[in-house]
Amino acid sequence: MSKTVVVNFVAKHSYTFVLEMIAGLSRNNCKIFAIVSRNMPEINNWRELKDIELYEVDGYTNAISFPFKILKFFLYDSAKIKSKIQKARATVIYIPIISYWSWFINHVCGNMPFVYAMHDPVVHDSNKIFIKTMNDWLAANAKTVVILSDVFREYVRKNYKKTDKEIITIPSGNESIQTTKGRIEIVHYDNNKVNFLFQGQIAKYKGLDILAEAYMKLRKKYSNITLTVAGSGDFREYEGTYNRLCDCTVINRWLDAEEVTGLFNDKSVITVLPYLSATQSGVINVAMPNGSPIIATKCGGIMEQIVDNVTGYLIEPNNVEALYEKMEYVINHKEEWEFIRKNAYERMKSLDWDVLSGKLAEIL
């Protein structure tokens, strides 16, 4: 018997893993009523999903317009949403990732139980008080909290007073996409060089200063290497340092899913994730299926995503020398790349979206 699930996802941007999970739920006999933002650049990807019902609101675009759009939501949309939920006989809400609208959507849906996918049990940015407060509220009140890594099970159990039965671990799946437009090339790689790549949100905990120092040291010894840093966020703190690096490309803006996939889609690319701390990394699930070996730090759930010297390489965090030595090792041991790629491919095969969404459907 099918169940109707309300998807609470009014966000500024959409993500491959959210779309894949929702499509998977639909294939696993769930009827989907998704509340989303029509302002997302990726809204057409939602409109193209089969067998789901969308309700589009005038969602988040910036902090200034936020209170006015929330007021408009309650005055115009809330009654319509309540009516549609009642008509659909929805029984549960699924929040695939936190957004500024998460609490407000839940409030309109009434006392319906909800499942919250907590991507960051520990909020990285202490300045995001609103998000941290909402994260804590959602985790404490959810009937089930979904975590991506078992390493945070004890933290969630203690901090949010959850039983083990109220916590379920579902890792993220393959976040690489197949494009009908052909390969999108926003960076041209020289196949005769080793091209190091950092991709993701620019944030202090990502260790970009460590990466710059290690790369600068490498360039004194190797001329056949390049570095690309690509992602949105405040890069001003790092501009001076990165401007001094040779053969370094910085793309400081939001990248859509096809652009992200294109960055990894070259056999000469080595992904570098020098995080100082982390819960897990979605970048890993793009790099692996695209054949890019990964150097990452031993922190958080990354240690569950990568088996050292088997599916990638792990180093101690906040250690310039360790990063330098591993990058140099990868340069000089190209014969290992195919072994790492093969094992990484096999790992990604085990993270099939139909299996992952089926596990989620069981507890919705």
Image: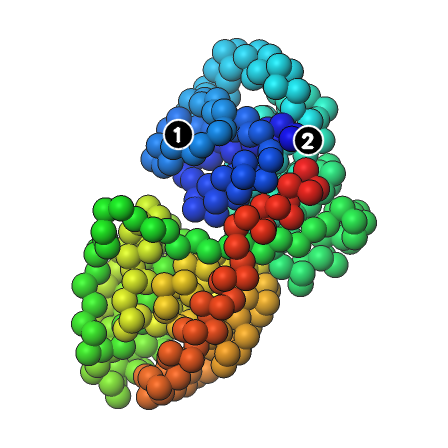
Q: Position of residue 362 (x, y in %)?
A: 69, 43
Q: Position of residue 206 (x, y in %)?
A: 45, 62
Res 47 label: 1
Tell me the quarter of the picture where residue 240 sits. bottom left
Viewer-nearest residue: 26 or 268: 26
Image position of 317 with respect to 256: above or below: below
The residue positioned farthest toward the front in the image shown: 1
- Crowd around label 1: few <14 · some 14–19 · many ≥20 (10 Å): few
Three-letter amino acid code of the residue under disc 1:
Arg
Res 95 label: none
Instruction: Give the residue at x 64% y 41%.
Output: 361
- Crowd around label 2: few <14 · some 14–19 · many ≥20 (10 Å): few
Q: Is residue 75 left or right of residue 121?
A: left
What whole-number distance in Å separates the C-alpha atoms at marks 1 and 2? 25 Å
Residue for badge 2:
1
Of the two numbered discs 1 and 2 in the rendering, the one whose residue sits closer to the viewer: 2
- Asked whether residue 207 appears in the rendered view, the answer is no
Instruction: Give the residue at x 35% y 76%.
Output: 213
Image position of 3 with respect to 123: above or below: above
Q: Quadrant of the image for the N terminus?
A: top right
Instruction: Give the residue at x 76% y 46%.
Output: 166
Q: Position of residue 355 (x, y in %)?
A: 58, 51
Viewer-nearest residue: 276 or 94: 94
Instruction: Give the residue at x 46% y 82%.
Output: 322
Q: Position of residue 105 (x, y in %)?
A: 58, 26
- Asked whether residue 21 appears in the rendered view, the answer is yes
Q: Quadrant of the image for the C terminus?
A: top right
Tell me the quarter of the picture where residue 155 sits. bottom right
Q: Disc 2 on helix, strand or loop? A: loop
